[in-house]
């Protein structure tokens, strides 16, 4: 508003100066001017809506002189300079409006058109260009070919409507098989109780572990297969017979099949086989404590399994998986391919290399991810023949330091009252503790 007001005052001053200079002489007729005749006033922009042009003040642009004759040349249109202030007063707004008034905008354009016509008649020296000079720069629209638009009636349009039932989508096949894997290679400190059933002693070692899981899942069936192996080797400095010894050696194959009964409960069959790959000897001795398939322990059972799988919606990576298997009827087979090992520490009666047992069992597995970096894994196994009981409780706390680096705290408690105690002394409890750091990869 202020800019328009200042511009109007500036034009008024210019026109008043021109009026004073021409007050002593009459207006020159058009025939005495050295420039071409003026344009018709109707050719100038009138209304921003009718003309389709942007609403702008043409007095702020370089002035262009029209070359055609019009009412101004015939003396039919003249505006005296004293009329301009009153015209400016008519279109000037006294207070700002949130929305411009359309009538004021049209009046302002009309006033600008009349002032431009008067300037062309009285002050031709202010004009920079003429319409003739600008004609070579007029855009050529002849290359644009007109397009014929053919309207279609309602009947033809209905035939062209794409209906959802006619669209062919991509058929995605359901996914039933799932694969996961965990691998680690870490440096560890390991504490082992003297009565550990596989033998060994406390040490600093290099540990390698691998877990491969392949499972089948649909609405009714759950079939999970696991292959796990662990191996830790250390340099036995105090052992004069064996330079290297095995601290932990495990090869485990497990399969669980379930058919849905109701909600998260499944009729289930579970089978597991465990042994080790390498031979382990007692310290400073050639006596073998365990070897491949010496012994091999196979247990199976039928019962009910409960599954729970939850994920947090607030904390990224937080989730929990729980699997509970209850078997009122289980079968255990202990077998050793060799008889030159210490079979008594594995629960074999004297002179036997094969044992059959019936009883009941319970298995529970928990994986609790506190977030994307910290997780807790736990496994509980208990089996009883109503004469002897074997229980195992494993816990591992994993902290991921980076994508491939992690640290781990592991505690393995085992109870077996089927082993023979020398001279009736000792305990049935066995302990395996481990703290490690190194590479860890999960897929």
Image (spheres, helix red, strand yellow):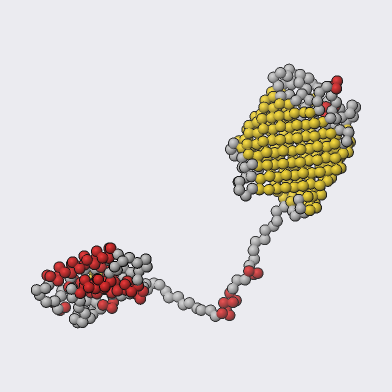
Is 133 located above or below residue 281 in the figure? below
Q: Nearer the viewer, residue 151 or 56?
A: 56
Visible residue check, residue 133 = no
Specify the quadrant that holds the C terminus. Answer: top right
Residue drawn at point x = 69 percent, y = 57 percent: 173
Q: Quadrant of residue 353?
A: top right
Residue that sits furthest to the left in the current view = 24
Left or right: where does residue 429 sit relative to residue 90? right
In the image, residue 440 lies at what x, y percent? Answer: 64, 37
Visible residue check, residue 320 = yes
Q: Quadrant of residue 86?
A: bottom left
Is 289 located above or below residue 312 in the figure? above
Left or right: where does residue 182 sit relative to residue 134? right
Left or right: where does residue 124 sit relative to residue 404? left
Left or right: where does residue 270 sit relative to residue 204? right
Residue drawn at point x = 25 percent, y = 71 percent: 89
Specify the quadrant that holds the N terminus. Answer: bottom left
Residue drawn at point x = 56 percent, y = 79 percent: 154
In the image, residue 271 lies at what x, y percent? Answer: 81, 42
Residue drawn at point x = 75 percent, y = 47 percent: 307
Q: Nearer the viewer, residue 288 or 100?
A: 100
Is 313 located above or below residue 211 in the figure? below
In the image, residue 347 lies at what x, y percent? Answer: 85, 30
Q: Nearer the viewer, residue 94 or 399?
A: 94
Say how many tags the image has. 0
Residue that sits furthest to the front in the current view = 95
């Amino acid at each position: 508003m202020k800019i328009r007001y200042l511009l109007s005052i500036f034009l008024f001053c210019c026109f008043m100066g021109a009026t004073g200079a021409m007050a002593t002489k009459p207006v020159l007729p058009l025939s005495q001017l050295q420039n071409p005749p003026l344009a018709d006033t109707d050719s100038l922009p009138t209304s921003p809506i009718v003309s389709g042009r942007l609403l702008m003040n043409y007095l702020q642009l370089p002035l262009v002189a029209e070359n055609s004759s019009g009412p101004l040349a015939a003396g039919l249109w003249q505006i005296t300079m004293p009329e301009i202030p009153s015209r400016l007063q008519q279109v000037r707004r006294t207070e700002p409006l949130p929305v411009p008034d359309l009538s004021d905008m049209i009046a302002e354009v009309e006033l600008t058109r009349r002032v431009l016509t008067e300037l062309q008649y009285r002050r031709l020296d202010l004009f920079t260009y003429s319409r003739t000079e600008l004609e070579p720069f007029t855009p050529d629209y002849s290359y644009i070919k007109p397009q014929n638009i053919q309207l279609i009636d309602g009947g033809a349009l209905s035939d062209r409507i794409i209906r959802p039932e006619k669209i062919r989508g991509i058929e995605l096949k359901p996914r039933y098989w799932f694969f996961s894997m965990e691998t680690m290679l870490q440096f560890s400190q390991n504490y082992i109780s003297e009565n550990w059933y596989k033998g060994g002693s406390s040490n600093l070692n290099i540990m390698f572990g691998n877990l491969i899981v392949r499972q089948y899942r649909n609405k009714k069936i759950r079939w999970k297969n696991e292959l796990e192996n662990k191996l830790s080797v250390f340099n036995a400095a105090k052992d004069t017979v064996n330079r290297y010894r095995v601290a932990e050696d495990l090869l485990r194959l497990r399969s669980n099949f379930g058919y849905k009964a109701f909600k998260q409960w499944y009729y289930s069959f579970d089978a597991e086989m465990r042994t080790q790959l390498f031979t382990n000897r007692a310290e400073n001795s050639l006596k073998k404590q365990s070897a491949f398939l010496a012994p091999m322990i196979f247990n199976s059972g039928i019962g009910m399994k409960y599954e729970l799988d939850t994920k947090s919606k607030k904390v990224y990576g937080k989730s929990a998986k729980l699997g509970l298997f209850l078997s009122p009827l289980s079968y255990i087979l202990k077998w050793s391919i060799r008889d030159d090992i210490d079979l008594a520490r594995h629960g074999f009666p004297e002179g036997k290399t094969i044992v059959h047992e019936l009883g009941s069992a319970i298995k529970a597995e928990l994986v609790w991810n506190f977030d994307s970096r910290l997780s807790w894994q736990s496994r509980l196994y208990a089996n009883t023949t109503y004469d002897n009981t074997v229980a195992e409780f494993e816990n591992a706390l994993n902290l991921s330091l980076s994508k491939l680096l992690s640290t781990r705290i592991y505690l393995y408690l085992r109870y077996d009252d089927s082993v023979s105690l020398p001279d009736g002394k000792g305990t049935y409890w066995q302990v395996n503790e481990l703290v490690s750091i190194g590479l860890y990869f999960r897929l």
